[in-house]
Image (spheres, rainbow, N blue to C red):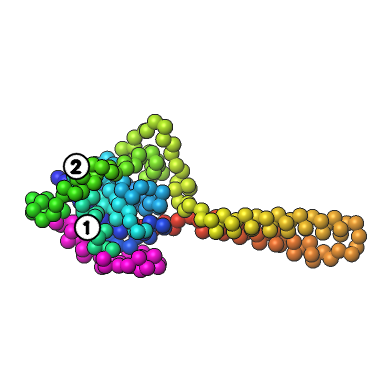
């Protein structure tokens, strides 16, 4: 049976879930797909705006626009044209209901959970294609998919969902695996790079001045030992600041 199982609305820049529908199936394949949902949500900024991930008997389809991604999980035989038409409806309704400022400033997961009502109603319509076919025109979506087909994400780009090889992982020639540590990193911004370089230079300068102070102290009694401590504390503070920036560059892990 070809059906839509669940859908989520996720912010692209950090993977924050804004709204989601619930699913009742608890099979091992579904549990693995939920983990792939999380992994994809952390990489949305690096992926094209229309993608498919084939995960065994299930497909994960998503589209992204204006900093928000609309994701769905369906059975493998669910038609692509219906899947992306469903996501397109979610996108249009969400953009109409919530402005960009609200989505950009949201801080709590699922802060637009009331949108689940629309997701559920739309999911029920799309799970009954006989009545749906007379209400929507799929020709435009069919043409769009034909002209610009969705990018199919190789499973090896995500790595294993459970820390071990997935039961339906496929090896792709010429495609390297990305470690989980790298998957969680957000792209560096210009301000972040400048701050990193300045902190590194300040730390190096304090370290050099500290060694010069030690040399002066050994040669004469005029140098105050407190200066030496201050220079090395400054170096430690700069290194700690670099470590903090690196830690903040990791995307938070949300349940999707």
Residue in the image at 10% along x and 51% along y: 133
Res 86 quadrant in image: bottom left
Q: Name the outermost residue toward the top.
A: 173
* In the rendered image, the vertical position of residue 35 relative to residue 225, given as above or below: above
Q: Is residue 197 visible?
A: yes
Name the residue that disc number 1 marks: 89
Residue in the image at 25% along x and 50% along y: 73
Q: Position of residue 54 (x, y in %)?
A: 28, 41
Q: Name the outermost residue toward the right.
A: 220
Q: Magenta stretch containing residue 193, yes or no? A: no
Residue in the image at 39% along x and 65% along y: 104
Q: Position of residue 220 (x, y in %)?
A: 91, 60
- Which span is picked out in magenta? 96-125
Res 96 quadrant in image: bottom left
Marks 1 and 2, how far apart at CA = 20 Å
> Which element is circle 1 on?
helix
**Which label is found at residue 3?**
none
In this picture, residue 159 sits left or right of residue 59: right
Name the residue that disc number 2 marks: 77
From the image, which quarter does the N terminus lie in?
A: top left
């Amino acid at each position: 049976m070809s059906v839509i199982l669940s859908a989520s609305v996720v912010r692209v820049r950090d993977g924050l879930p804004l709204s989601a529908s619930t699913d009742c199936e608890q099979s091992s394949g579904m549990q693995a797909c939920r983990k792939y949902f999380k992994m994809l949500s952390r990489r949305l900024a690096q992926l094209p705006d229309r993608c498919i991930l084939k995960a065994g008997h299930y497909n994960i389809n998503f589209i992204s626009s204006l900093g928000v991604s609309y994701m769905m999980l369906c059975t493998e035989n669910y038609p692509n044209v219906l899947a992306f038409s469903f996501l397109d409806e979610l996108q249009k309704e969400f953009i109409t209901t919530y402005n960009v400022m609200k989505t950009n400033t949201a801080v709590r997961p699922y802060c637009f959970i009331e949108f689940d009502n629309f997701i559920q109603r739309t999911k029920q319509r799309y799970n009954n294609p006989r009545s749906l076919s007379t209400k929507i025109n799929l020709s435009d979506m069919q043409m769009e998919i034909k002209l610009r087909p969705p990018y199919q994400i190789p499973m090896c780009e995500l790595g294993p969902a459970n820390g071990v090889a997935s039961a339906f992982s496929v090896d792709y020639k010429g495609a390297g695996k990305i470690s989980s540590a790298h998957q969680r990193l957000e792209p560096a911004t210009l301000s972040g790079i400048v701050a990193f370089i300045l902190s590194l230079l300040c730390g190096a300068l304090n370290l050099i001045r500290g060694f010069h102070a030690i040399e002066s102290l050994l040669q004469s009694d005029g140098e105050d030992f407190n200066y030496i401590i201050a220079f090395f504390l400054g170096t430690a503070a700069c290194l700690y600041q670099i470590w903090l920036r690196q830690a903040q560059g990791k995307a938070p892990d949300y349940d999707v």
